[in-house]
Amino acid sequence: MLAQQNKGLRVFHEANRNHWQEQWQALEKNRDIFSSLPFFRFFIARFPALIASYC
């Protein structure tokens, strides 16, 4: 019974780790969009309070 629970947890953690790897890969692909100046200017113009709260 306990071994079965451990196996279930291990499968869950494996799936979770794979999910995070996919998320990071998607972020890497989109990094050039976020680093482009026009987009950043748009973001600052739309969300000045959010930017100020992180400074």
Image (cartoon, helix red, strand yellow):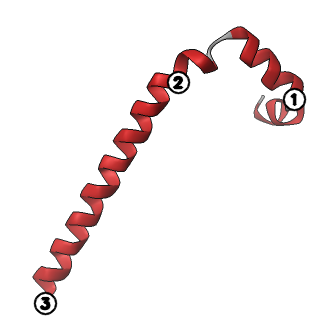
User: Of label 3 and label 1, which has the lower sequence position?
Assistant: 3
Tell me the kind of residue under disc 2.
Asn
> Which residue is rendered at x = 43% and y = 40% of the image?
23
Q: CA distance from mark 2 to mark 3?
A: 44 Å
Mark 2 burial class by Cα count in 10 Å: few <14, some 14-19, many 20+: few
Q: Position of residue 5 (x, y in %)?
A: 20, 81
Q: CA distance from mark 3 to mark 1?
A: 54 Å
Q: Position of residue 29 (x, y in %)?
A: 46, 23
Q: Which residue is mark 3?
A: 1
Asked whether the beta carbons under mark 1 and mark 2 sit within 8 Å of each other, the answer is: no
User: Of label 1 and label 2, which has the lower sequence position?
Assistant: 2
Q: CA distance from mark 1 to mark 2?
A: 20 Å
> Which residue is rendered at x = 13% and y = 90% of the image?
1
Q: Which residue is mark 2?
A: 30
> Which residue is rendered at x = 74% and y = 18% of the image?
40
Secondary structure beneath label 2: helix
Image quadrant containing the C terminus? top right
User: Of label 2 and label 3, which has the lower sequence position?
Assistant: 3
Tell me the kind of residue under disc 1.
Arg
Tell me the kind of residue under disc 3.
Met
Asked whether the beta carbons under mark 2 and mark 3 sit within 8 Å of each other, the answer is: no
13 to the left or right of 29: left
In the rendered image, which quarter is residue 33 located in? top right
Q: Which residue is mark 1?
A: 46
Q: Residue furthest bottom?
A: 1
12 relative to 17, above or below: below
Which marked residue is nearer to the observer: mark 2 or mark 3? 2
